[in-house]
Amino acid sequence: MDIYSEIILDRYKNPKNKGKIKNPDKKAEEDNPLCGDKIQIYLKLDKKGKISQAKFTGEGCAISQASADMFMETLIGKSLKEIEKIKNEDVIKALKIPITGPRTNCALLCLKATRDLHG
Amino acid sequence: MINTSQIKSDFPIFKRQIQGKPIIYLDNASTTQKPKQVIEKLINCYENSYANIHRGIYTLSEESTKAYENSRNLTAEFINANPEEIIFTKSTTESINLVAYTWGEKNIKKDDEIIISILEHHSNFVPWQQLCERKKAHLKIIPIKKDLTLDISAYKKLLTKKTKLVALSAISNVFGTIIPIKQFIALAHKKNAKVLVDGAQSIAHIPTDVKKLDCDFFAFSGHKMLGPTGVGVLYGKKEILKNMPPFLFGGDMIKSVTIKKTTFNDLPYKFEGGTPNIADIIAYSEAIKYLQKIGLKEIHDHELNLLKYAIKKFGNHKEVRLLTPPINQASGILSFTVKEIHPHDIAEIFNRENVCIRAGHHCAQPLMENSKLSATARMSFYIYNDFSDIDKAEKTLIKAINIFK
C-alpha cells in the first residue's frame, strides 16, 4: 500500500476543513523547517468549552495537509484538556497509510500545533 | 569531454543497488560521493602511518606530519595561495565563524556596515547577522533581480565608507547562479572594505584563483569536492591573518605558555588549535588530485551540458516551473517546483526510483521568503552524472505528476 492513498490525495486536493475562522477562541502555528511544511490552526469553543469549529490553513506536503484536514474533524466535540491527551499513534493510525521515518513529522505537524494553543 | 562511466567506476557507492535499482545521485550541492582513491588513502593512513602531527620524533609521526602538510600544500596550489595562508577547519561554516569571531570581533564597531546578499546560505548569513547584533552594526542585503542574478547596481548603492566587510557566495546553492565576484570584490576594495567569499558551492565546480580574485578570505569544504567530511578550509591573506587574534586556544597554536602569559604560534598553526582531523585531511589530498586530473573547466562544461539537457527535458512539462538564471551565469544546480505537488512529495516519489534530490529551503530561508517560495526541489549534477540520470529523473517526474493528477 502506498502513502499516496486515494484518501490522502483527495484530502490534499479537496480539503474539507481548510480556511480561517473569524475571531477564533484559540489558534496555533507550527512549522516543519526541514521541508517547508506550515500549519495554522483555528478553534472555536462552545459555551461548554467544547470545540465546535476547527479549521486549518497552511502549505506543505500532501501528508501534512491531508493529516491536518482529517485531524480537524477529530477535534470537534472535545475539550482543550481532552485534545491534550491525543497521542501521536492516534493521528498516525487515522491516516491508514504505512508511514515511517521523517514523514511521520509531516503527519504530526497538526498535533504538534495543538500543544501550543494561544489566544 | 568527461568520461562519466569511467569516473563512476571509481566510486564504490555506485555499485550498490537499492531494491534492485541503481543509485542516481543528484544531490551534489549538499555533498559529493567519494572515489576509491580518497577512501583507500584514509584506510591506508590508519593502517600504515597514523600518528599525531607536529609532535613526535619517531617515523610514524614524521610521515603523518609530512602527509598532513602535503595536503596543505596541495590545497594552496589548488586555489593559488601560499601554504601559510591555508587554515584547516572542520567545515565552511566553521571557517566563516572563525572570521566572524576573530577578525569580526576585533574590527567591527557600532554603526559599521556589513553587506551580504539575499542568496546566502545560512552559514554565510547568520554569523554576520549575529555579529551585527552584538556590535550594533548594520547588516545590508544585496537583492536579486528577476533573472536570479545579483543586482550589482543595488550593490554599488549599498557600499558606503562605513562598509567594513562584504560576505558573498561564489555560486548560489539554490539557483546555481555564478556571482561575478571579481567585480564585487574590486568595488568593495575601492571603499576599503574586506571581502569574504563563501566558496562551498563553487570550489568543486569552477576554477578558483584567490590571487586573481583578490578576495581577503575564501572558505570551502572538502566534502563538497569528493573529500571526507570534517575537512574545511579557510584561506586568508597573510597580512590579515597575522593581525587576527586566535580562534580556539589550546595545544599546537601556542609558542610558549607560562602561568601568566601565552605567546601564539606562527601562521597557519595559530588557527589550528587542538588535534586536527588528521587522517581525513590526509585523505583529502587525493580528492584534490582527482579533480585536478579532470580539470575544473572541463567539470563546469560537463555540468552545463547536463543543465541544458535537464532544462530542455523538464521544461517540456507545463506543470514545472524552472528556477534558473541565464545560462551564461548558470552552473550545475537546477531548482524547480511542480504545480500543486509539494517539493517534499516530489522528492519522496523520486526516491522510489532511487533518484536522490533535495527538497526544502536549502538552508536559505531569507532567499525563499524573498522569492515567495515555501520550498523547492533541487537537482545538482556532478562528474559521475550523465544524460541517462536526467532521463530517469524526468520519468519519475511524470510518475509524480500522474499520481497527483
Image: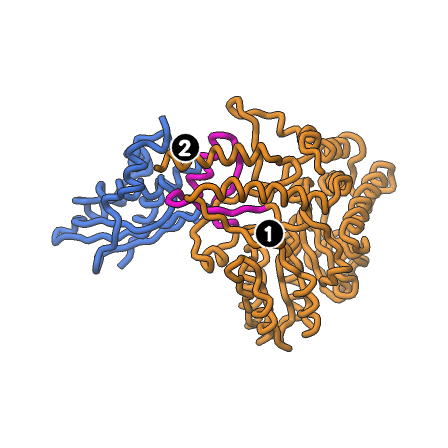
Chain colours: A blue, B orange
Image: B245 above or below B58: below
Question: Does the magenta-highlighted stretch encompass residue B354?
Answer: yes
Question: Relative to A50, is B388 on the left or the right?
Answer: right
Residue B11 vertical placement versus B176 (above, below): above
Taking depth in this image into account, of A110 and B312 the one nearest to the observer is: B312
Label 2 in the same subunit as label 1:
no
Q: Is residue B126 left or right of residue A38?
A: right
Chain containing the residue with disc 2: A
Q: Which quadrant is home to the C terminus of chain B?
A: top left
For label 2, count other residues whose C-alpha is less than 10 Å away and answer few (under 14), some (14-19) or many (20+).
Answer: few
| Residue shown at the point (30%, 38%) measured from the top left | A87
Depth check, front residue: B277 or B128: B128
Residue topped by disc 2: A100
On screen, residue B5 above or below B207: above
Which of the two marks, 2 or 1, is nearer to us in this view?
Answer: 1
What kind of residue is marked 1? Ile
Report whether residue B205 is seen.
yes
The magenta-colored residue range is: B333-362
Q: Which residue is mark 1?
A: B327
